[in-house]
Image: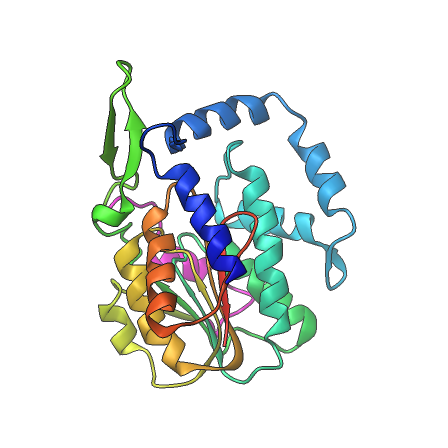
């Protein structure tokens, strides 16, 4: 009940209307890009993550290595969100290692986050070579935005319109490229195709952990409908949140509301469900 009241208060602050605050993601992005672009970002990262380790390696150093290895760019706008959410993701991922079942990431892009998880898995299981880890992506960019995915954009004259942020079908990745980044983990399963169709090609099995980084409403909802019934007790589904991804957040809320499932929303809008 308390969580529902908090979420209702947050929604009322960002829903627009007379006297209410409207969040304009593109304006926030420009402001933080300028602000963080002039700041000593690496020093802030050192302070924030100096005591966090993955096995014998510092978390921030490991994640930076994964980003560079895969050629993944992090902008000044989202650098702190990216590092903090990946640390949180890692904590949930490691907590589910005792849970039986496979692990999946849906929305892989170039594989930096999945590579981070693979290294973390090996820090707890020395002979881990990628087995039971499924990387699901179209490798052809995002699908088309639908109404829940649209964000408010303010024109120079002060008028507001709603439009999609992610250009459909635009990408700089491929299954072959990502496979090349996982040379240390040759048994990782790369599953290329659009959601929901690609989910039907997965082997029928149980799952322990699923990371959803799909940005849009429809693929997020389809993934929840596929994975949750197959998730083992104690398993986790974590969905990335962002001011640019209202549709993904709405899909998670819709799915859990229909099934009366309790979940939490963390500091960077990640939604987390434990079965």
Q: Residue at x 27, y 77 (%)?
A: 201
Q: Which residue range is magenta in the image? A: 169-188
Quarter of the image where one finds residue 29: top left
- Residue 108 appears at what percent x and percent y? 41, 57
| Viewer-nearest residue: 64 or 50 | 50
- Residue 149 appears at what percent x and percent y? 28, 46
Whether residue 76 appears in magenta in the rendering, the answer is no
Q: Residue at x 46, y 52 (%)?
A: 7
Check the image and report above or below for 230 versus 67.
below
- Residue 160 appears at what percent x and percent y? 26, 26
Whether residue 171 appears in magenta in the rendering, the answer is yes
- Residue 222 appears at what percent x and percent y? 28, 67
Q: Residue at x 74, y 54 (%)?
A: 52
Residue 269 appears in the picture as rendered: yes
Quarter of the image where one finds residue 170: top left
Q: Residue at x 34, y 86 (%)?
A: 204
Q: Main secondary structure of the magenta part?
A: loop
Q: Is residue 113 left or right of residue 45?
A: left
| Viewer-nearest residue: 137 or 240 | 240
| Viewer-nearest residue: 24 or 235 | 24
Check the image and report above or below for 227 versus 74.
below
Q: Is residue 147 left or right of residue 75?
A: left
| Viewer-nearest residue: 257 or 167 | 257
Residue 241 appears in the picture as rendered: no
């Amino acid at each position: 009940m308390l969580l529902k009241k908090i979420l209702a208060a947050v929604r009322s602050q960002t829903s627009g209307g007379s006297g209410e605050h409207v969040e304009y993601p593109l304006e926030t992005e420009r402001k933080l890009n300028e602000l963080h672009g002039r700041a000593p970002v690496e020093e802030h990262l050192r302070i924030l993550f100096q005591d966090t380790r993955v096995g014998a390696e510092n978390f921030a150093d490991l994640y930076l290595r994964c980003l560079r290895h895969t050629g993944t760019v992090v902008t000044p706008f989202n650098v702190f969100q990216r590092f903090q959410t990946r640390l949180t993701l890692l904590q949930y991922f490691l907590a589910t290692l005792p849970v039986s079942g496979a692990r999946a990431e849906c929305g892989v892009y170039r594989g930096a986050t999945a590579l981070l998880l693979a290294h973390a898995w090996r820090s707890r299981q020395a002979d881990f070579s990628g087995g039971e880890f499924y990387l699901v992506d179209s490798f052809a960019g995002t699908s088309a935005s639908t109404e829940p995915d649209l964000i408010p954009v303010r024109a120079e004259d002060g008028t507001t319109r709603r439009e999609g942020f992610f250009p459909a079908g635009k990408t700089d990745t491929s299954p072959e490229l990502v496979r090349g980044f996982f040379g240390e983990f040759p048994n990782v399963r790369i599953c290329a195709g659009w959601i929901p169709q690609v989910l039907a090609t997965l082997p029928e099995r149980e799952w322990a952990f699923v990371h959803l980084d799909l940005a849009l409403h429809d693929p997020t909802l389809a993934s929840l409908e596929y994975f949750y019934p197959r998730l083992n007790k104690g398993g986790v589904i974590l969905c990335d949140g962002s001011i640019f991804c209202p549709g993904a957040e709405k899909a998670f809320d819709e799915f859990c509301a229909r099934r009366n499932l309790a979940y939490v929303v963390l500091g960077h809008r990640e939604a987390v469900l434990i079965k």
